[in-house]
Amino acid sequence: MDALFREDAYARNCIATVTAVDERGIRLDRTVFYPTGGGQPGDSGVLRFDGFEVRIKDTVKGDGGPDDVIHVPEDGQELPGPGTAVEAEIDWDRRYRHMRMHTALHLLCAVVPGSVTGGQIGADKSRLDFNVPAESLDKDAIAEAVNRLIVADTAVDTRWISDEEMAAQPELVRTMSVKPPTGSGRVRLLNVEGVDLQPCGGTHVARTGEIGGIEVTKIENKGKQNRRVVIALKD
């Protein structure tokens, strides 16, 4: 399966062929739909074929590896059979908010020292959990630092390294709860030039300026040394 979202996060649609349909959903030979993973929700959208439109409520990973993507349809719809040509189109407004949020969390990770113990991306709010003492975090100072990085409009890109290179650079991994996907021979890195470099399989904006500004809505105590920082986009 050709994971188009991995090379071009801005691709909103594609022409694809149905390869399988089962109780879990629809598999295609190529897709722009991102499957749930790394704290980022799966895409929603539509598949169009022969005058029909199938609403996709979620996208998840199957059991066949990182390129096994399942498009989960809403109930009660006529589904295309294997071999059917479809146009796959994501809900772009939702995806683009996820992209802005995901890149913003990488900036947050660069600003707050300490290991990341968890995280979740959403269209309206997102969060990272840090293994740091409470007194080290100031809501206004964090927001100011992240917004400075946003205004700098720094380039964001991805690159690949081998599993062996990844193993030789354990300092690249900031997240304790999500380990980088190895075993396929290479690992994808997200690079915010001069700011952040770490393994990530998600979708991101091309420049930090696209985020448009964030606010830190709250900092929560989630344990002795676990602090949850919640952010929202300003627009």
Image: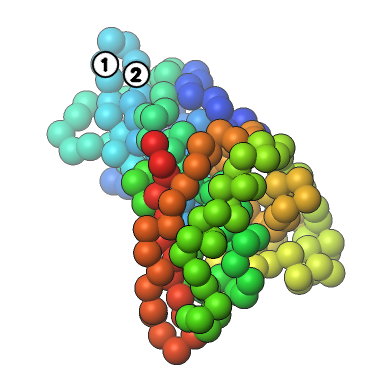
Looking at the picture, tell me which residue is in the foreground, 60 or 158: 158
Asked if 217 appears above or below 129 in the picture, the reply is above
Residue type at the position of mark 2: Arg
Whether residue 115 is visible: yes
**Which mark, by number, is residue 52?**
1
Q: Quadrant of the N terminus?
A: top right
Residue pictured at 50% horizontal, 21% vertical: 14
Above or below, 176 against 157 in this view is below
Residue 186 in percent (x, y) is at 75, 53
Measured from the top left, where is residue 124 in percent x and y? 34, 46
Residue occupied by mark 2: 48
Quadrant position of residue 93 = top left
Are circles 2 and 1 on residues that touch, CB within 8 Å?
Answer: yes
Whole-percent x, y for residue 216 in the image:
43, 57
Q: Residue at x 60, y 74 (%)?
A: 115
Question: Hey, which quadrant is residue 106 in on the image?
Answer: bottom right
